[in-house]
Image (spheres, rainbow, N blue to C red):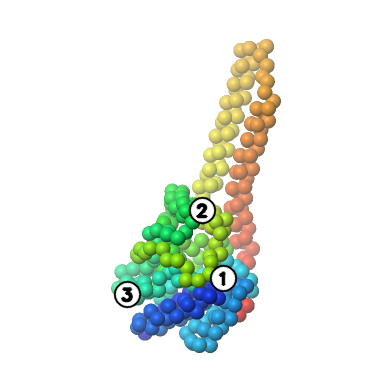
């Protein structure tokens, strides 16, 4: 019998954990597969760890990993993948926005041998703030224009993968992780199942618009060098304009020696504008250097405090 590892990153989800387990177990119990649950407690401040311990005592198939502090969802996902021993591995959100009813179909599709991964994507964002939905749509359009790695619009982390694909993902030990990009970058044949947005079963999302914005910047810097090219072109264009301006002043002085150029306010504005561009370009370069700095220090992506 095949083993299915279910990876569930959690942060302050004490209400959702038992509901998630009951809903998924109801589906998995009808499948001819051995389940293996890996709940990852990402430094929660509520009773999430207590709920995980209770499930572990109740069901030997349930395991959990508890971090020493909050390391973020990407670290939680990686920890689950590291611990998983299944022939197939599925990543799911604990809030049940990832419908468990898809699990049998995913497993059946993978067993056919035609695909290496069965992913999911939302066809709408009903119930979400319009601003957040708009920014998300713009992000997917933008990153797919500047990156060679396709990021599927609306794609969720909810996907079932073969062991071969999981091992490929685990081979990428980069400190800054953008899983949607990693899943696409490693390749392998993937099929997506479409579904309409599902509301959270309990609690509230901890992802703010600002956090999503920073996550989007991580994705751009991880899978595109376009910002660096932008800095180069911006510097080149402003330099060319400056040279033209100098030539204009020299020619004007030769043609009309008595003419004088006034406008100290506009001159200050130009200096501030060019200084701002320089700082922007330095900031872009610094962003990439900072990521290199974090990578070469070889700090652990997560630290486990308790595991069972």
Cα separation between marks 3 and 1? 31 Å
Most foreground residue, 182 or 19: 19
Q: Nearer the viewer, mark 2 or mark 1?
A: 1
State the image coordinates of residue 232 (x, y, percent, origin top left).
55, 41
Label 2 belongs to which residue?
Answer: 220
Q: Is residue 3 visible?
A: no
Q: Disc 3, disc 2: CB below 8 Å?
A: no
Q: Residue at x 43, y 69 (%)?
A: 98
Q: Which structural element holds mark 2?
A: helix
Q: Position of residue 290 (x, y in %)?
A: 62, 55
- Cα gap from disc 3 to disc 2, whole angstroms: 34 Å
Dot 3 crowding, Cα within 10 Å, few <14, some 14–19, many 20+ = few
Query: In the displayed structure, does residue 258 sit left or right of residue 192?
Result: right
The quadrant of the rendering that contains the C terminus is bottom right
| Residue carrying label 1 | 11
The residue lying at 60 percent from left, 80 percent from top is: 306
Label 3 sits on residue: 108
């Amino acid at each position: 019998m095949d083993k299915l590892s279910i990876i569930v990153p959690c942060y302050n989800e004490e209400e959702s954990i038992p509901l998630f387990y009951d809903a998924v177990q109801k589906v998995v119990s009808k499948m001819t597969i051995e389940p293996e649950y890996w709940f990852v407690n990402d430094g929660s401040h509520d009773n999430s760890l207590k709920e995980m311990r209770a499930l572990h005592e109740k069901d030997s198939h349930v395991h959990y990993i508890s971090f020493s502090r909050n390391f973020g969802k990407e670290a939680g996902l990686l920890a689950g993948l590291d611990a998983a021993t299944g022939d197939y591995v599925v990543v799911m959100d604990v809030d049940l926005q990832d419908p468990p009813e898809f699990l049998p179909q995913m497993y059946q599709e993978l067993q056919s041998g035609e695909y290496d991964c069965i992913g999911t994507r939302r066809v709408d964002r009903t119930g979400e703030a319009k601003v957040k939905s708009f920014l998300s749509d713009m992000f997917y359009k933008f990153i797919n224009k500047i990156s060679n790695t396709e990021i599927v619009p609306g794609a969720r982390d909810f996907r079932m993968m073969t062991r071969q694909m999981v091992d490929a993902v685990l081979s990428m030990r980069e400190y800054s992780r953008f899983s949607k990009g990693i899943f696409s970058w490693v390749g392998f044949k993937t099929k997506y199942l479409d579904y309409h947005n599902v509301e959270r079963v309990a609690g509230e999302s901890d992802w703010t618009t600002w956090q999503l914005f920073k996550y989007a910047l991580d994705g751009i810097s991880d899978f595109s060098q376009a910002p660096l090219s932008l800095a180069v072109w911006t510097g080149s264009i402003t330099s060319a304009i400056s040279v033209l301006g100098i030539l204009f002043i020299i020619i004007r002085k030769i043609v009309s020696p008595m003419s004088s150029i006034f406008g100290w306010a506009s001159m200050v504005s130009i200096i501030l504008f060019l200084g701002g561009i320089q700082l922007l370009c330095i900031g872009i370069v610094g962003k990439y250097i900072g990521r290199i700095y974090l990578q070469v220090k070889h700090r652990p992506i997560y630290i486990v405090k308790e595991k069972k």
